[in-house]
Image: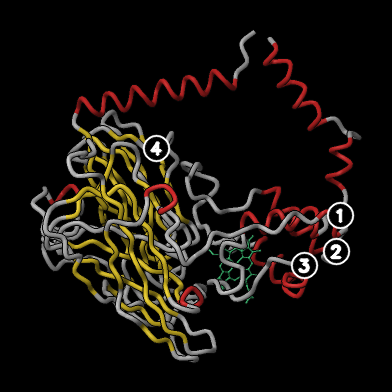
Amino acid sequence: MVKSLSALAVGAVLIVPGSARAADAAKTPTFAKDIAPIFQAKCEACHRPDNMAPMSLQTYEDARPWAKAIAARVGGRQMPPWHIDKTVGIQKFKNDRSLSDDQIDTIVRWVNAGAPKGDPKDMPAPKVWADETVWQEAVKLGPPDLIVKSPEYTMPAVAQDAWWRPSVATGLTEPRWVRAIEIRPVGKGARKITHHALARLQQPEDMDPALFTNDPNVAGDGLFMEWAVGKNADEMRPDSGRLMLPGSKIVWEMHYHAVGEEISGHTELGVWFYPRGQEPKHREVLALFNSFSGNSPGARALDIQPNQITTTESFITLRQNARIENFQAHMHLRGKGMSMEAIFPDGRRELLSQVSDFNFNWHNMYIYADDVAPLLAKGTILHLIAWYDNTKNNKANPDPDQWVGYGDRTVDEMGHAWLNITYFSDDEFKAETAKRATATATAAGGQQPQQ
Ligand code: HEC
């Protein structure tokens, strides 16, 4: 009873016209009061000195000259970079950096009103950022157990973007279970030139290849792990881990871009292991599922005609019960979007996630929140659809008159989903599904006040 009354009261304050809140909302937003808190929460991670973005947005003086560009990029949902379609599929992510509709509205109204500064007394205290020269995860877990370094790279002051893929042995002599990972660019200015850095794990595996790929060409290569900068450390879900084997290598992929001064740097991967003897119950693997079919080795059936929009699709039957931990679309310059649908054994279908505004410059990984990561029984079919715009309407397209096929170069195409998957036995899966049902029921009970 008390619960329902307070819920009503909160609702009433929000909707009563003429209330203090309603009057407030109609007022012109100011930088000090309304904008700075949003920028601290959603922009400064990249837009601060010596970081990836071209300008700082920490102070009014920093931000004011960019007001028009901010309205355009924010209003068009290009900034912050988050390309998941907001109108369909799962919307709860661990690493969501997007703005709410209200925040976008506030920013655009602020710019339209001449981007006023407001009363400096309203400014929030400057956000304190963690020291980037130390491992963030070390606060919790101590120094990393293993550090793998990429070779040093020097980016000239002026140059084309570079994608660099050196490979480095991990030196492991026994299998170890991974509980946390962190990636960081190292060197003065390295964060400015490092647009993204991925670390893939390559190792000999004797696992059923169908559990981690539908691409016959990578079947022998083993298992990969992929990480993007912008999200610091990542911990595995409880009782889950990745397995690193002796003979493993880290295959780096760094996207470097020139910023007007010569800068050298490298990237480090810190790995924290579970203690020997304390093995997690579940193994998480990174799966590569193509959005097109290629049934024989060498056949990567991607065929994109000039001046056309092309769609491909694939159907992947899950051989084991699975929890999908994240969704990441990997495409190149013609890539425009990708959707992932589950077709359940009873024929029911559910669209899980869709990227509708793919941008090759951003390798966003969309990590599902704990209570919504899809739990899919074996026999469920993952249905991937990808679409490619090889017309002149695609601004990223270097040449719409080219016939484009599968390939490594950015002017060739790819179209696959990277999915972190935890596989479960039937008993484990039953337990996981039951846990989820209880959690969901409790959450729903909390929202619906009992009379
Ligand atoms: C994950 C990092 C990241 C986040 C978070 C981010 N940005 Fe950016 N932003 C960039 C990078 C990198 C560029 C330059 C490359 C580009 O334009 O895409 C950029 C470019 C821009 C530009 C264009 C600058 C120009 O040269 O015209 C604007 C405006 C902008 N960001 C505003 C914002 C605002 C406002 C936010 C928060 C609401 C934000 N960004 C959040 C990384 C980020």
Q: Which residue is mark 4?
A: 350
Q: Are marks 1 and 4 in contact (CB under 8 Å)?
A: no
Q: Which residue is mark 1?
A: 28
Q: Can you tell me which quadrant of the image ligand 1 is in?
A: bottom right
Q: Which residue is mark 3?
A: 60
Viewer-nearest of discs 4 and 3: 3
6 displayed left or right of 310: right
Q: Residues within 10 Å of mark 4 (few under 14, many from 20)?
A: some
Residue 309 higher or lower than 205, as above or below = below
Task: Look at label 3 and name its amino acid.
Answer: Tyr
Task: Look at label 4 and name its amino acid.
Answer: Glu
Task: Look at label 2 and name its amino acid.
Answer: Pro
Q: Is mark 4 within 8 Å of ligand 1?
A: no
Viewer-nearest of discs 1 and 4: 1
Query: Residues under labels 3 and 2: Cα distance?
Result: 9 Å
- SS of the residue under disc 1: loop
Viewer-nearest of discs 3 and 1: 3
